[in-house]
Every structure is written in C-alpha cells, then in structure tokens.
C-alpha cells in the first residue's frame, strides 16, 4: 500500500495513494459509508499501531463523482470515519502538490460531507473553504465527575464539538495529561446526560478555549480517538467561529488567529452562509514527512493493527 505522510501545524495525516479496498461507484459519501460498514480491518491496519497512532488521520484518495474536483477524499482515524477534517484536507492538498497533481490556485475536493474548495498558496500552505457551520445549542451545562458544572456550546464545523471556556488548568503543554483527563470526563458526561449533535450524532470532540499571548485564543482539543489535536483544529475552530458570530463577536471577513496547545496557528475568517450559518475559511501550513510502502506480511499477528 503506497502512502505519503505529512503534518499540518503538527497534526499528522497519512494519504493513501493505492492499495485500498474497492468501494464501488457512487458519491464519496456513499463510498465512505461502505468503507465504514465493510472495511474496519483495512482502516485499523493503516492508522492503529504498529503502523500508526491515535493522533493519525488517514485520507484515502478515491476518484471524485463530482465533475471538476481534483480528487475524492475519505477521512478516518482509529475510531472510524470522519465526515470532514481541516488539517487532513490541508495535508492532502500539500501532498497532491508534492506529487505534481495540482499547482497553486483554486481546487475542489469531494469529501463525505460535501465539496470543499482549496486555495493552494504554495507547496506548503493552503486555505480551505469549509462546509457551512453553525451552533446547535448555547450554554449547555453538564455535571462532570471531578470537575463539577462545565458549561459550553454544541456546534458543527464538519464534526460535532462541545466548546467550553471552563478550564480545569492553564492551557499549557505541561498540563496535557490533566487536560486529556478533563476533556475525556466532559465527553463521558455529555454521553451519560444525553447530549448529542443533530439527529442524535455523537459529540466526538471537546474543545477547551482560553487566552493566548500570540493569537486571538488558544485551545486544547480532544479528538474521537482519545488523543489531542496538535493543530488548532480546523473543524473545531469553524464551529467556534459559528458561536462567535451568533454572539455578535465576529463580523464576516474579520480575521481570527487560533493557536493550538503546541503553539501552532491557523488564520481564519468566514463568509455569510444561508439561514444564519457561516462558511469558514481556514489557512494553515503542512509539510510532507515520508513516502512509504506499507507491508502486510503473511502470519503477522498484528497486520490489521493492535486493538486496545
């Protein structure tokens, strides 16, 4: 299986060029559903240890069904499929540029949640125009074991997020273990107390938001796998912008700089969408780190990954 690895502002992406399963015809959304239903072993073999890690997001390239798209992309991690992923989309664009498949300019990618526009600025920097984002619930309070009452917003930015400014400790790298424990507790509390995204969807990401000396805000983001996002989280910041907009704190076109827990940044603004929703634009950098062939040896007991 041929892959190219990259990182976007610190968060890893693995683009699968060849060797994936036959997902048949139809939209990328249809083929993503088949991947989720029928090919768990394939997904695990790519992103779980010993070949991968909890932080890794894979991007499977497939032929697009929408005319004019440069590629179709299906995202997944150790938990399962992702509808959209900001850092992996930037990483995919930089990988396609590395391969010579696209040049600086405007391109479209078909994802499971719709067509995303990519503006490739250079070989290492791109802006993505995300799908429409919105807030579902404001000021939801949950009782969290060991933390007490935690209040936040539930919002959509391509994935479902609970965004809170109630911090258990400072947003510093030295506190990552404490922040992981806190956000995992918050996610369990949301599940136990019946909070979901639209249509009963799992709120799989938790964002803790705090002040920054170098940006508009700093965040710590719990990912579905239980790891933390090294990047500022494109879909999470899209959801945040939707909340800021609804609260009258950010105008269309106004810039927002989001800092991650490791100090990397995205620059964002948004366009007005329909029905009060917004269309976020996320700018970030990515670098190719490896070109590899993944081998699957007969008799390897962990060929399809290590499951905890």
Image (cartoon, rainbow, N blue to C red):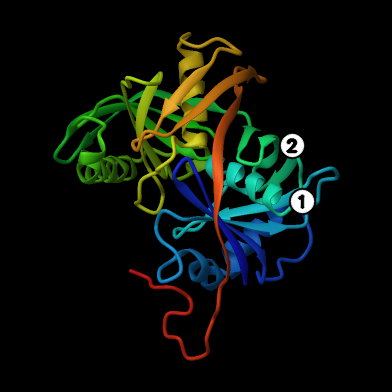
What residue do we see at 50% from left, 11% from top?
250
Is disc 1 surrounded by few (<14), some (14 to 19) or many (20+) residues within 10 Å? few
Q: Nearer the viewer, residue 184 or 149?
A: 184
Q: Quadrant of residue 285?
A: top right
Q: Secondary structure at mark 1?
A: loop
Place residue 301 in its image quadrant.
bottom left
Answer whether labels 2 and 1 touch (C-beta < 8 Å): no
Q: Is residue 17 above or below residue 8?
A: below
Q: CA distance from mark 2 to mark 1?
A: 11 Å
Q: Secondary structure at mark 2?
A: loop
Q: Return the residue nearer the eye: 302 or 136.
A: 302
- Give how far across and how far down residue 31 sits, in percent: 69, 59
Identify the residue at horizontal 57%, vertical 30% (top origin): 283
User: Looking at this rendering, what residue extends furthest in the right direction?
Assistant: 67
What residue is pinned by disc 2? 104
Establish if 187 lies above or below 296.
Answer: above
Q: Residue at x 53, y 42 (%)?
A: 87
In the visual, does 159 lie left or right of 1?
A: left
In the displayed image of the protein, which residue is found farthest to the bottom?
A: 299
Q: Is residue 198 left or right of residue 104?
A: left
The correct choice, above or below, for 111 with respect to 198 in the image is below
User: Where's residue 280, x and y in %?
Assistant: 59, 26
Tell me what residue is drawn at x 45 percent, y 60 percent: 78
Say the numbered circle drawn on residue 271: none
Q: Residues within 10 Å of mark 2 (few under 14, many from 20)?
A: some
Instruction: Measuring from the top left, give residue 144's x and y in whole percent.
Output: 21, 37
Q: Residue 214 or 167: which is nearer the viewer? A: 214
Q: Is residue 247 left or right of residue 70?
A: left
Which residue, given by chain and number where applicable, does mark 1 sit on? 101
Q: Which quarter of the rendering shows the N terminus?
A: bottom right
Residue 293 lies, in percent from the top left, at 59, 72
Q: Which quadrant: the C terminus? A: bottom left
């Amino acid at each position: 299986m041929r892959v190219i690895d990259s990182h976007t502002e610190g968060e890893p992406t693995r683009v699968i060029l060849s060797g994936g399963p036959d997902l048949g015809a139809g939209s990328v959304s249809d083929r993503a559903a088949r991947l989720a239903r029928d090919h768990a072993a394939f997904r695990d073999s790519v992103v779980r240890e010993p070949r991968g890690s909890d932080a890794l997001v894979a991007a499977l390239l497939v032929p697009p069904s929408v005319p004019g798209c440069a590629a179709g992309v299906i995202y997944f991690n150790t938990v399962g499929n992702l509808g959209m992923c900001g850092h992996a989309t930037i990483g995919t664009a930089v990988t396609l540029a590395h391969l010579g498949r696209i040049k600086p300019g405007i391109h479209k990618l078909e994802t499971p949640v719709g067509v995303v526009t990519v503006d490739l600025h250079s070989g290492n920097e791109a802006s993505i125009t995300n799908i429409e984002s919105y807030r579902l619930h404001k000021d939801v309070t949950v009782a969290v074991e060991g933390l007490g009452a935690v209040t936040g917003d539930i919002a959509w930015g391509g994935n479902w997020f609970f965004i809170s400014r109630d911090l258990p400790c400072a947003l510093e790298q030295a506190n990552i273990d404490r922040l992981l424990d806190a956000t995992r507790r918050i996610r369990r509390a949301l599940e136990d107390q019946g909070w979901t995204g639209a249509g009963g969807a799992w709120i799989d990401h938790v964002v803790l938001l705090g002040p920054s000396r170098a940006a508009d805000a700093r965040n710590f983001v719990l990912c579905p796998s239980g790891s933390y996002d090294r990047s500022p989280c494109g879909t999470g910041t899209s959801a945040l912008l939707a909340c800021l907009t609804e609260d009258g704190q950010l105008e269309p076109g106004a810039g927002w700089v989001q800092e991650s827990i490791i100090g990397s940044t995205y620059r964002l603004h948004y366009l007005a969408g329909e029905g009060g929703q917004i269309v976020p634009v996320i700018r970030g950098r990515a670098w190719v780190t490896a070109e590899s062939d993944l081998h699957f040896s007969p008799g390897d007991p962990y060929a399809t990954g290590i499951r905890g």
